[in-house]
Image (cartoon, grey):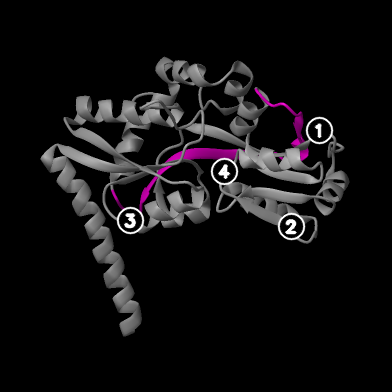
Amino acid sequence: MKILTPVVLSILLFSSSQLFGQTEAYERALNDKTATIDLHYFENEPMFYKAGETFKGIEVEILNRFSNWMKNEKGINLTYNYVEHQEFNDLYEAVKSNQGNHIGAGTVTRTEDRAIELDFSAPYLRNVSVLVSSSKLKTARNAEQLKELLSSTQAYTVKGSVHEQHLAALFKEYEVEPKIIYLSDPKAVFDKINESPRYIGYVDVITFWKYIKTAEKPVKMHKVANSTDEYFGFIFPRGSGWAYEFNEFFESGFGYTSTKEYHKMLEKYLSFEILKSVELSPY
């Protein structure tokens, strides 16, 4: 029989006590029929933004619909305590390091590594990551042209985002020395691209669509580098229990994302050309 060392045993005991603390907060909410959840967010229109004194956006509407569902189906009153973050990485780390009643709404793409550190809800939206640049650059249409593009430009993206991982993977695949500078806001990628035609960046397709609607300078995407097998989900501290309730809300019956309500909600914020790319299911 394998004997655990004191260090390994202490780690296991800490992990067990931490998980118990997470479950205890969740169970208390269920028993008390009320809970206040810290809702961690950063503004990113049309996903989560403030209009006057009111929060709006796709994530906001889903979260409000969830709280209504908890009231109607479980008899539990939920209150959100809004916690703003200026950067994606700060939001991610805040949720990961906390215990108890916390939700992260930050267009977080589910990856295998992140699923080890956090609990994810079922997906609420499909994502496409796109490589963008000034329209003055030649469009990369194949591997050779993409390598040339990566070799001759400076890349920008958000620290800690899945786009950072995509860029790092591209540089590695094409054996190009990585040249990545980090920004706090995905919209700032376009500010950089406007500064010089030698700058490129990775953003999600909704951010790209939102930008080009009002852009003063033309930009383009290089579809050869697009990543389409991605999904956004809400995040929770590992073992918090709230992911279970969210997944029941998303997946009970035919599932929230297959309803007319879900489709109409997306229509409020997205045009048809982008809607067909990111909607999970037709109603």
Task: Give the crowd class for mark 4: few <14, some 14-19, many >=20 residues within 10 Å.
Answer: some
Is tag 3's residue or tag 4's residue first in the polypeptide sequence?
Answer: 3
| Residue under the point 24% across and 30% down | 70
The residue wearing badge 4 is 185
Occupied quadrant, residue 21: bottom left
Secondary structure of the residue carrying tag 3 is: loop
Q: Which residues are magenta?
A: 214-240
Is tag 3's residue or tag 2's residue first in the polypeptide sequence?
Answer: 3
Secondary structure of the residue carrying tag 2 is: loop
The residue wearing badge 1 is 135
- Answer whether residue 15 is magenta in the image: no
Q: Nearer the viewer, residue 53 or 254?
A: 53
Q: Are marks 3 and 2 in contact (CB under 8 Å)?
A: no
Q: Nearer the viewer, residue 151 or 18?
A: 151
Q: Nearer the viewer, residue 182 or 122?
A: 182
The residue wearing badge 3 is 98
Place of residue 235 in the rendered image (x, y in percent of width and height, measured from the top left): 40, 45
Q: Calculate the distance from the C-alpha at mark 1 to the C-alpha at mark 3.
A: 43 Å
